Amino acid sequence: MRNEGRRGEVRGQAKRARVVVAARRPGVRLPPLEPYGDGPLEPEGDYDGLEFPGTDLAAQDGTGSRFMDCALTGCALDETRLAHARVYDSRLSGIRGVGTNLADATLRDVELVDARLGGTRMHGAVLERVLVRGGKIDYLNLRGARLRDVVFEGCVLVEPDFAGARLERVEFVDCVLKEADFGAARMKDVDLRRAAELGIARGVERLSGAVISPAQLMELAPVLAAELGVKVAGADD
């Protein structure tokens, strides 16, 4: 009985020590790739084992397309239509664009590296085992999206919109969040402790299921007080 009690105590300590479950990162290993031709993207297209080196895909329509084992490097994606697209086991490096439409898309086992994007529409998208490393994304719309095993690392997110999204095992590592919107979001095992900057414009009350550092708690204290309707004043005020 004593040993059983001791084992239970150890298990309890281990459980308490595991504050948050880490995200599983993608393991993208691309096969030898064939170069993509000069033709435009096609709706419902099927792209498998292709390399897009500096390809200008601006304003093209790839709605509902499938990309499997692909590499997009330095591609222009201004106003590119990729709603409902499926991107699997692929690496997107140095892509750039404004107004790219990835609404309701599915990204699974994807690396997004050094992107320069603005106004990207990803509302309703599904992201699973996705690494976003480096780069800057302005006004990323992830409203109502589902994120599972997603890591934002060393990137800058300006006014990202996570309103109504579901986040599970999501990490923010050495990245900057400016004026993030978490309104009506649902979180589980979301790790914000290593964010280089944590700025929350809306939805601070939705952080249940997230972990923050003591320093971040102090920084967020005014926002939390305002949300709770608490007035902060000195004894002589």
Image: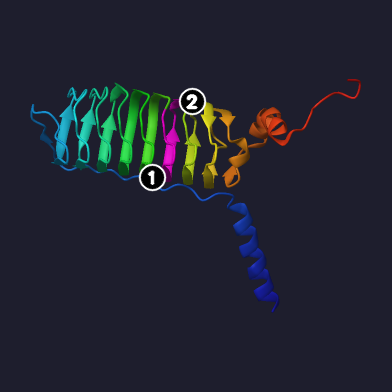
Name the residue at the bottom extreme. 1
In-image side of 133 versus 222 (left or right): left
Q: Magenta segment, which residues?
A: 140-157
Q: Residue at x 30, y 22 (%)?
A: 97
Pair 2/1: label in front: 2
The number of callouts visible is: 2
Residue 68 picture quarter: top left
Front one among 235 and 124? 124
In-image side of 136 versus 206 (left or right): left
Q: Is residue 69 visible?
A: no
**On-image quarter of the N terminus:** bottom right
As drawn, the label of residue 25 is 1
Tag 2: amino acid? Glu
Colouring mode (rainbow / by chain / secondary structure / one colour): rainbow
Front one among 105 and 199? 105
Tag 1: amino acid? Arg
| Few, some or many residues within 10 Å of mark 1 (<14, 14–19, 20+) | some
Task: Say which label, 2 or 1, has the lower sequence index.
Answer: 1
Q: Is residue 61 above or below residue 24?
A: above
Image x and y of residue 170, in percent: 47, 43
**On-image quarter of the C terminus:** top right
Q: Is residue 120 above or below residue 191?
A: above
Q: Residue at x 61, y 64 (%)?
A: 11
**SS assignment at label 1:** loop
Residue picked out by circle 2: 159
9 drawn magenta: no
Image x and y of residue 84, in percent: 27, 41
Name the residue at the right extreme. 236
Image x and y of residue 212, in percent: 61, 39
148 drawn magenta: yes
